[in-house]
């Protein structure tokens, strides 16, 4: 449901600006897309998620399960490096910092007892993407992106119910639109990041309270997910 709402908001935003763009006939910066290299920056918001698989581990008669019942809005900022290939394709390298958190709730199967924890998750990501551009219509041009990324968690902490591994990798997909303004391009983009690695750190020698081990032991694997709405300025 949260993903559907985000997509709907993006479509409404895209439709509103597209209507404005269609009314303009004069092309702004008609040759900007033919530059061999260009730079830019991005800012945006995101929500972090995790796909969790459980072990069914039982400790002292208790069986715990974990979930992320809600997103917490985070902030994203990065720079863009773009390499022109041909009329429809570009290669992009947009290293990005994501500042956010994951609100994880553990629930005991029988009693319904809950334990809540918040993991501060700040990631430095290095995506490498292929950008496919549709044909330009006046001052707008839709596009799709796809590629892979590697990331590093720059805020690992000890003595928490869960600890995440510092490194991750995965796939990234996006859709957006170039809007050609007189001085620059504004490109709103909706992105989906799908982690492929298990990021749950099973080595919990850092725990001073061994009772906390049951939370890590209850999870078989956890893979990062993220949905982002970013605005590229190029």
Image (spheres, grey):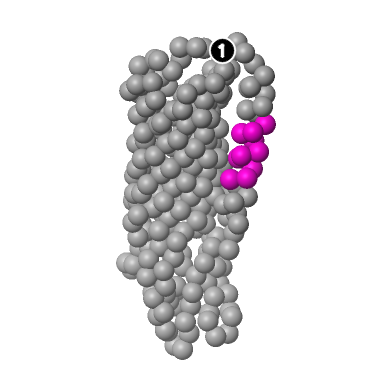
Q: Between residues 187 and 153, which one lies in front from this camera angle? A: 187
Q: Decide: is 24 above or below 150.
A: above
Q: Position of residue 132 (x, y in %)?
A: 41, 31
Residue that label 1 marks: 27
Quarter the N terminus occupies: bottom right
Residue interval drawn in magenta:
7-16
Residue at 57% in and 18% down: 138
Residue at 46% in and 28% down: 134
Is residue 208 at least partly visible in the picture? Answer: no
Helix, strand or loop for disc 1: loop
Q: Position of residue 67 (x, y in %)?
A: 52, 67
Apparent side of residue 93 relative to residue 29 in the rendered image (left or right): left
Count of number-bearing discs? 1
Q: Between residues 90 and 48, which one lies in front from this camera angle? A: 90
Residue at 55% in and 32% down: 188
Circle 1 crowding by C-alpha within 10 Å: few under 14, some 14–19, many from 20: some
Q: Between residues 158 and 36, which one lies in front from this camera angle? A: 36
Apparent side of residue 103 relative to residue 79 in the rendered image (left or right): right
Residue at 36% in and 49% down: 170
Magenta-colored stretch includes residue 11: yes
Apparent side of residue 127 relative to residue 2 in the rendered image (left or right): left
Apparent side of residue 150 relative to residue 214 in the rendered image (left or right): left
Q: Position of residue 34 (x, y in %)?
A: 40, 15
Q: Main secondary structure of the magenta part?
A: helix
Is residue 92 at least partly visible in the picture? Answer: yes
- The part of the image, by quadrant, that contains residue 107 is bottom right
Q: Position of residue 22 (x, y in %)?
A: 63, 22
Q: Between residues 19 and 32, which one lies in front from this camera angle? A: 19
* Residue extending furthest toward the bottom: 61
């Amino acid at each position: 449901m949260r993903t559907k709402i985000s997509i709907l908001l993006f479509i409404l935003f895209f439709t509103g600006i597209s209507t404005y763009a269609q009314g303009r006939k004069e092309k702004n910066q008609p040759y900007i897309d033919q530059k061999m290299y260009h730079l830019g920056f991005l800012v945006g918001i995101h929500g972090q998620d995790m796909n969790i698989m459980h072990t069914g581990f039982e400790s002292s008669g208790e069986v715990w399960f974990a979930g992320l019942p809600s997103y917490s809005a985070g902030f994203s900022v990065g720079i863009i490096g773009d390499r022109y290939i041909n009329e429809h394709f570009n290669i992009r390298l947009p290293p990005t910092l994501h500042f956010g958190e994951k609100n994880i709730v553990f629930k005991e199967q029988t009693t319904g007892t809950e334990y809540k924890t918040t993991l501060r998750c700040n990631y430095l990501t290095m995506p490498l993407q292929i950008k496919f551009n549709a044909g330009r219509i006046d001052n707008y041009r839709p596009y799709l992106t796809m590629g892979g990324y590697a990331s590093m968690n720059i805020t690992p902490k000890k003595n928490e119910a869960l600890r995440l591994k510092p490194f991750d990798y995965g796939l990234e997909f996006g859709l957006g639109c170039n809007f050609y303004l007189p001085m620059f391009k504004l490109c709103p983009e909706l992105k989906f990041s799908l982690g492929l690695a298990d990021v749950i750190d099973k080595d919990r020698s850092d725990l001073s309270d061994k009772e906390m081990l049951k939370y890590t032991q209850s999870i078989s694997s956890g893979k990062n997910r993220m949905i982002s709405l970013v605005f590229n300025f190029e």
